[in-house]
Amino acid sequence: MTLGMLFREGKETLRKAGIGEWELDAWYLLEEVTGITRSRYYLDQECPVEEADEHRYRELLQKRSRHIPLQYLTGVQVFMGYSFLVDEQVLIPRQDTEILVEEAVRHLRPGMEILDLCTGSGCILLSILKIIPGISGTGADLSEGALRTAERNRKNLGVHGAFVRSDLLEQVEGSFDAVLSNPPYIPSKEIDGLMEEVREYEPRMALDGGTDGLYFYRKIIEQSPAYLKPDGMLFLEIGYNQAEAVQNLMEQGFTGIRVVKDLAGLDRVVYGRLKPQIDGGKKCLTD
Ligand code: GLN
C-alpha cells in the first residue's frame, strides 16, 4: 500500500462516517502517524507505507469515525500559538476563548497575581503566563484529571504557576488582581442537542452550566469580590446569548462592565472592575 492510497482510503472512510472536515482530519491523522509534511507527501505519494503505520492509521480512522474529536486522537490543540496537551479529562481549548485572553492581557501587568477558575487544560492561565512574564497565577478546577493535564501543560510550557483542586473558590487562598473564567455555561437540557464530538466525548462537567446555564456565573460573581484586591478585575467568557444576564449579575459588585464580541460578531466576554468597597463591603440599605 502506498502513502497516496492510504490517504485516499482515510478520506473515504471519514467522508462515509459523516465527519464534517473529513479531508482535513484524514490529513492530520496521517501526519500524526507518519510524521510527514504536506510537501513531503506530494513527493512520496507512491512510496510504500510501513505496515505498523497503516495499522495505526486505520485504528485512528475508526476512532474518528466514532466522532471522537480529532484533538483527543492527536493529543494536542494550539491555543494562542502555544501547544496544549489535551485528553478526555479536559475541554478542548476553543479559538473563541482567545478573545478572553487577549482582552485580559490588555489590562494585566507584570507583578500582578491572577486566578483562573475552571482551568481545564490550563489554556487561559498558562498562555497569559507565557505572554506576560512576571505575572503569577493560580488555576483551580474540581477535576483531578484536568489538573493533571494542566500541570503537564505547565511543565511543557516552562512557566511557574500553581494548580489547586477546588470547587470554584472553596479551596483558594489569597487575593488577586484578576479572576478569569471560562466556566461551563451550556444549559443542561441543551447538551443533548450539541454535536456528537462535544456531547459524547468532552467532559460533561466542563459543559453543563445548570438549568439556565448561569449557575457558575452566579457563584463566581458572588464569591470573587472577596478574593479580589481593590480595583481587581473579573473576566468571564459567556455564551452568545448570555451577555445581558451576566452583565446584570455583575452590576451590583462591579463597575465599568464591558462586553466583547468574538470574531463571528457574537458576544463572548464580559468583564468589569470591582466596585470600591464601602463599609467593608456591606451596604447599608436602611438606617
Ligand atoms: N478554561 C478551560 C478552557 O477555556 C476549560 C473551560 C471549561 O472546562 N469549561 O478551555
Image (cartoon, rainbow, N blue to C red):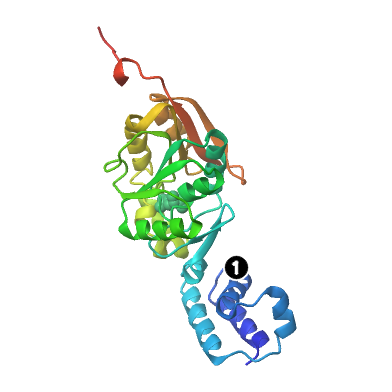
Residue 117 visible in image? no
Q: Position of residue 205 (x, y in %)?
A: 34, 54
- Give the residue furthest to the left: 287
Looking at the picture, does residue 48 appear above or below residue 130?
A: below
At a point 29% along the width and 46% down the height, the residue shown is: 167
Looking at the picture, does residue 186 appear above or below residue 47?
A: above
Q: Position of residue 263 (x, y in %)?
A: 62, 46
As shown in the figure, which amino acid type bears the numbered disc 1?
Glu
Labels in figure, total: 1
Q: Position of residue 194 (x, y in %)?
A: 45, 58
- Residue on which the image places disc 1: 21
Q: In the image, is 36 to the left or to the right of 168?
A: right
At a point 34% along the width and 60% down the height, the residue shown is: 145
Q: In the image, is 164 to the left or to the right of 76?
A: left
- Relative to the observer, which residue lies in front, 127 or 135? 135
- Relative to the observer, which residue lies in front, 68 or 107? 107
Q: In the image, is 152 to the left or to the right of 170?
A: right
Looking at the picture, does residue 125 appear above or below residue 2?
A: above
- Give the residue furthest to the right: 43
At a point 36% along the width and 56% down the height, the residue shown is: 147
